[in-house]
Amino acid sequence: MLPRIVYTRHALDVMEERQVLQEWVARTVEAPETREPDPSDTDLTRAFLAIPERDGRVLRVVYALEPDAVRIV
């Protein structure tokens, strides 16, 4: 089970603009198909998952692990 997920204002704005559900973000962080470090910031991780509800399009979620949360950026 993941720690709680918190969203930056930027993440929430982009999710609204692109109609990305929080459920999809959580699913991507919890069980990604692939995961890699962010090339521009080593404190961040990129997780990728195909979303069946979006015709299999791949969602990329960038996040930082914090002591008590996962911060979606």
Image (spheres, rainbow, N blue to C red):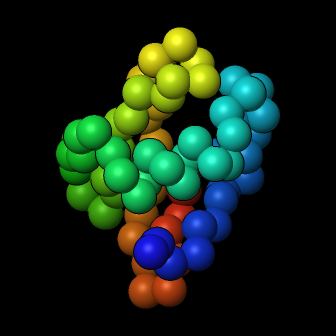
In the rendered image of this protein, does residue 5 appear above or below residue 29? below
Q: Please name the residue shown 45% across and 75% down the image.
A: 1
Q: Is residue 51 left or right of residue 19?
A: left
Q: Nearer the viewer, residue 17 or 39?
A: 17
Q: How many marks?
A: 0
In percent of width and height, residue 37 lies at 22, 49
Q: Is residue 18 left or right of residue 45?
A: right
In the rendered image of this protein, does residue 24 appear above or below residue 20? below
In percent of width and height, residue 27 lies at 49, 50
Q: Please name the residue shown 63% across and 66% down the image.
A: 6
Q: Please name the residue shown 46% across and 72% down the image.
A: 2
In percent of width and height, residue 17 lies at 76, 26
In the rendered image of this protein, does residue 39 appear above or below residue 45? above
Q: Is residue 2 left or right of residue 72?
A: left
- Residue 38 in sight in this render: no
- Residue 59 in sight in this render: yes
In percent of width and height, residue 40 lies at 28, 44
Q: Please name the residue shown 35% across and 36% down the image.
A: 48
